[in-house]
Amino acid sequence: MQPILYCHRESGHSYKVALALTLIGVPFEQRPVDLNLPRAERPDDFRRASMFGEVPALVDEDGLAVCQSNAILDHLARRHRALDGATPAAKTRVREWLAWEANRIAMSLPHLRFSRRFTPAGDALEAYWTHRMHADLDRLDLALGVEPFLVGAAPTIADVSCCGYLFWADQAEVDLAPWPAVTAWLERIRSLPRWQAPYDLLDDRFPIRPGTRT
Ligand SMILES: N[C@@H](CCC(=O)N[C@@H](CS)C(=O)NCC(=O)O)C(=O)O
């Protein structure tokens, strides 16, 4: 059986997982979830797979359900021995970036983008997220000025995790020009064999309706 990815086209967290599967070369079935519906009304198979009721969730080839994008990335890297650090120390560095992403980028850019593209959250929150996003870009730029990818010379799930939402920086009205190492890194990722942009990779069912909050 192919892995099943419960996802949504406007979810960068879903994109991270779809991108990792695609870069590794694992065929998968997409099951888009209508995020406009209250959680209790989402399909039963999705609710069984997703412990916290969010996309993405992956059901792997053995039927194991995994949720939380970075936990899924870790699962894929270990299962397929791909997109991971080359040494035990490098594997640890990769997971440090996953934890950083969850608390930093994932707490700024997705919210800023959602507010500006779909359901406004107000100026004060947007200013707060923008401030955090700029600090995150400073940190990424520092790391990427040293090595071509976040952990060494080859891409890993750390890059997949941290880049996911950045392909939508324009939708968040964040101009990446002041961060040249980040811009060059995104270009390197775009040039990887099999790379696909979010809207080319994710199914376009269930557009977000005005007023929806995720
Ligand atoms: N920490 C989670 C975040 C997932 C998340 O925020 N998912 C959003 C879409 S991007 C969602 O499912 N929202 C639906 C809802 O909250 O009802 C991850 O990394 O997977």
Image (cartoon, rainbow, N blue to C red):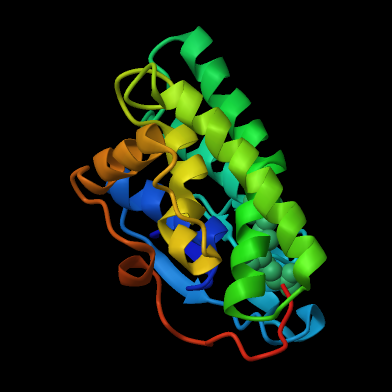
With respect to residue 198, does 36 lie above or below? Answer: below
Q: The N terminus lies in which quarter of the figure?
A: bottom left
With respect to residue 103, does 165 lie above or below? Answer: below
Q: Who is closer to the viewer here, 191 or 34?
A: 191
Query: Which residue is located at x 30 percent, y 46 percent?
Result: 23
Q: Who is closer to the viewer here, 29 or 156?
A: 156
**Left-right relation of 2 to 72:** left
Residue at the extreme front of the image, as rendered:
178
Give the x, y percent position of residue 163.
Answer: 45, 45
Please identify the quarter of the rendering in which residue 101 is found. top right
**Left-right relation of 121 to 191:** right
Give the mark count.
0
* Residue 49, visible in the rendered structure: no
Query: Which residue is located at x 49 percent, y 68 percent?
Result: 171
Give the x, y percent position of residue 156.
Answer: 40, 31
Please identify the quarter of the rendering in which residue 58 is found. bottom right
Question: Which quadrant of the figure shows ligand 1?
Answer: bottom right
Q: Who is closer to the viewer here, 48 or 172?
A: 172
Give the x, y percent position of residue 208.
Answer: 59, 85
Give the x, y percent position of residue 43.
Answer: 67, 82
* Residue 204, visible in the rendered structure: yes
With respect to residue 25, does 37 lie above or below? Answer: below
With respect to residue 68, does 213 lie above or below? Answer: below
Q: The C terminus lies in which quarter of the figure?
A: bottom right
Query: Which residue is located at x 40 percent, y 77 percent?
Result: 203
Query: Which residue is located at x 31 percent, y 52 percent?
Result: 22
